[in-house]
Structures are given as structure tokens and as C-alpha cells.
Image: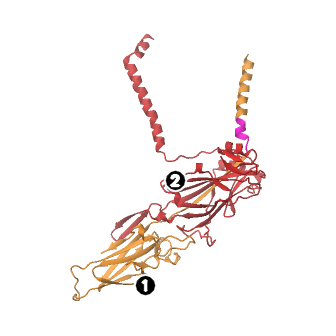
Chain colours: A red, B orange
Amino acid sequence: MKQLRRLLSSPAVTVGAFALAACLLAFSTIGGTRAALTYYSENYVSTVQMHELGVSLVENGAVVATGNAVTSARAARDGEQMSALLGTLILEQSGAAEPASEPFKLGAVYREQLAVHNPKDNGADAAAGAANITQYVRVTIRRYWVKPNGAGGWTKAPELDPDLIELGLAEGNGWVEDADARTRERTVLYYTRPLAPDETTPVFSRTLRIDPSVSATVSRTENGGTVTDTYIYDGAAFQLEVRVDAVQDHNAADAILSAWGRSVLIDADGTLRLD
Amino acid sequence: MKKRRFLLAVLALALAVTAALPSAWAYFTANTTAGGGRTVRLGDRTEITETFANWKKSLVITAEPVTQPLHLRARAYSTYELQYSGADWTQGGDGWWYYNYALANPGDDVAEEAQPAWTRRQSSPLEITIRVEGVPQGTVPEDFDVTVVYETIPVTYHADGSHSSAAEADWTQGQRGGDAG
């Protein structure tokens, strides 16, 4: 014991402990530095849903996705992929559906009328039971680009410009944007009226167009008489992702704050206003 | 004493659980997500073939697989007087001659007949006749030089889905072609 005390009080141990502390301090900052270099991080969402409430996303008049407790449990269990948007492309002006063999046309305006429906039959899902609760809804729209990752999958490409994915939002029909939640990739819209069972909101988007300037960024190589142009956006795929959230209308302000983390005001006539 | 401590522990646990319950179970919520997208196809490889005979240059541009639809224009530079001609070529009034069809080649696995009717895999020839005065038959002047330049630019579409013409294309985006001497 005496030897241990002598050892601990020696200058060498003091200097060594100081050096160790300095090293630990230095390494502890490396994590923070690395984190700052990360461009984006994945979102992890955990929710609890009830059978009595369901919500559907409607694209060009057809329901493309319905969420309730049963579908959520099934998706979690089976690892189901999200429902598909843009299955059929319809030219806005003519109303003609584009054949699947046709390439996507840069600059053309496609119809993309999106709305939210409160499904009384819960998406005809008998297991989910009837949905009979008036609700408030919001949508979170994400626009981004992905590129092939070489392993048969796709990787998000944050260096490509989401502003070139032009989703024509409908204005002045009951939807209001949460400007505080806006990023270049994300748009969050709240429907200001309570949505009764079997009711559908007005559309919150009307059209989709890809800015033809995606073809402007190019590098050129010449080999003899052959000229090869390589485009930054060649092979990239634009992605449109829409998440719909619904919450009960009863005690709505508290429910929305609890479920969505957003402070809102509910007027006497049921109108929702962002706080 | 032990029993009292046990009861206190149970009480504390019950308090903790009931305190957490309102935030977890008080509100009905639902959500759903849908997503999708399309791949943008760009990229092209073009090759120029030029023949010269009888003071006439003949220019043909070919789209290699896999080339997305392109507009095409060409012109020549020389100190000599030049005369252009060619089926499916239109004079633009700016010194350039514009090919009336778009060049495209979706790949060898797609028949040319299956391509859109407004595209071709190879341009028709653009003939450039060089008028040379006072030069003996069969000789070429030492300073003879006619440089042919061509440019391509990806086809874009109008809002209604129809394709743009070569004259409508924004050629200010920069040269996308090559030249042949």
C-alpha cells in the first residue's frame, strides 16, 4: 500500500495522467468534427396508430396508399416497401397517359394531383375496421435525386439540385405551408380544416415538371471523330415522396403538439392556424 | 420493513408508468407514405464522317448507341465561297444549317423502326460545294482550308409533351459537337 501511494505521488505518474487526459480530450472532439461533415442523416420515426383512424393519399383521383394500425403493423412485420407514386404519367394539357416505353420528357408538364382522404372503410381493409373519426392532416413532401450505387440499389445524391424537381403546389384552397419546416428538399403542408370521415381535401399539388436545364451540365471528350458527352444527371432518378399524417380532431391542439411536435391554434370554427 | 420497501417500489413503478401513459396513448394518429420517381436518360456519342471529292464536302453525323434524342446543326468556315445543299437540312439564317430530324439511337436491341418517327440514327448528307476560281483542274491550292463544325444539344419538350425543334433549342448552352478539317 505504501509503495502504491509512493507510485501514485511520483511526478512521472502525474505527467502520464495529464498526457492521458489530454489525449482523451482531443479524441473526444474528433467525433463532433466528423459529425459536422455528414451532409444529412436518416430519420427514425416511431408511431403508435389506432384502428379507428385511417388516412389515404390520393393521386390523380385514385387512392395509392392507406395507413392505419393494421397496415403499419403489416409493413413493420413484412418489411413492405412504400406504395408507389408516379405509376402512370399523364400529360397535363392533353390528359393523355404516356406509355411506359416512352422516356421521361424533360420540360413536359405532367399531372400530379395529390390530395388526402379520410377513408371511412379504412382503405377497404376489413382487419382495420371502420374509421369514423374526424381528423386533422398534414403532408410532408420530399423531393430529391438518387443515383445507382453499383450494387443494384440506389443512393441518395444530395449534390443534385432538388429545385429542378418542380412540384406545382396548389395555393389558396385550404392548405398552408409551414415555412419553419421548409428545406430545399422538404415541404410541409397543413390542411386548415378538419377532415370528416369519407371526405377528401382539395388537391395540394397539381403538376410535376423536371426543369430541362438538367441537360445543361455536361463534360465532353473527343476521341478521333467520336464526341462523347457525359451529363451529371444522366442515369439519376428524381424521387417524390409524400408522407401523410393524421390526428384526431378532439383536443386537436394538444394532440398535434404531442403527435407532430408543432404548436397550432384551433379556432372556434375548427380552423387550424400555425402558431 | 421489507414489505413496506417492496410496496414503495411497486408504487414508484406504477407512478412512472402512469406518468408516461398520457403522451403515449392519449391521441389517435395514423400515417402513410408513398413515393416514386423516374430515371433521367441523357448522354450521347456522335461521330462525324466527311468525304471530299470534286470540290465538294459531304458531311454525315451518326448517333452511336446509346444516344438520347439530339438536335443537330452544322456549318463550314473557309476563305472560299461555300454553297450548301442537303435533303432534310434547313438554313437557319445565322450561318448554321439545322437538321430537320433529331438524332437518336436507343441501342442495338431496339429496331430503328421502333424509334419515334421524328428521330434518325444517321443524318442525311449535308453537301458543301466549294467555289474555287482560277485553279487548274486537278490541283489544290496550298492555302486550301475548309473547316466543318457541328453541334448537338439534347432535345427538350414543351409543356404539352411535344418535342422542341432544332431552331427552338437553346444553343447558347455551349458547343456539344466536334469539327472535321
Residue B143 at x, y = what percent? 22, 79
Q: Which mark is residue B73?
A: none
Q: Chain of mark 2?
A: A
Q: Which mark is residue B87?
A: 1
| Foreground pick, A107 / A230 | A107
Prevailing secondary structure class for the magenta stretch in the rendered image: helix
Disc 2 target residue: A156
Residue A57 falls left or right of residue A132: left
| Foreground pick, B67 / B129 | B129
| Foreground pick, B77 / B54 | B77
Place residue A101 in its image quadrant. bottom right
Check disc 2 and give the amino acid type: Lys
Tell if the residue under mark 1 belongs to the same chain as the one under mark 2. no
Q: Which residues are magenta?
A: B20-27
Q: Is residue A230 above or below residue A10?
A: below
Check disc 1 and give the amino acid type: Ala
Q: Chain of mark 1?
A: B
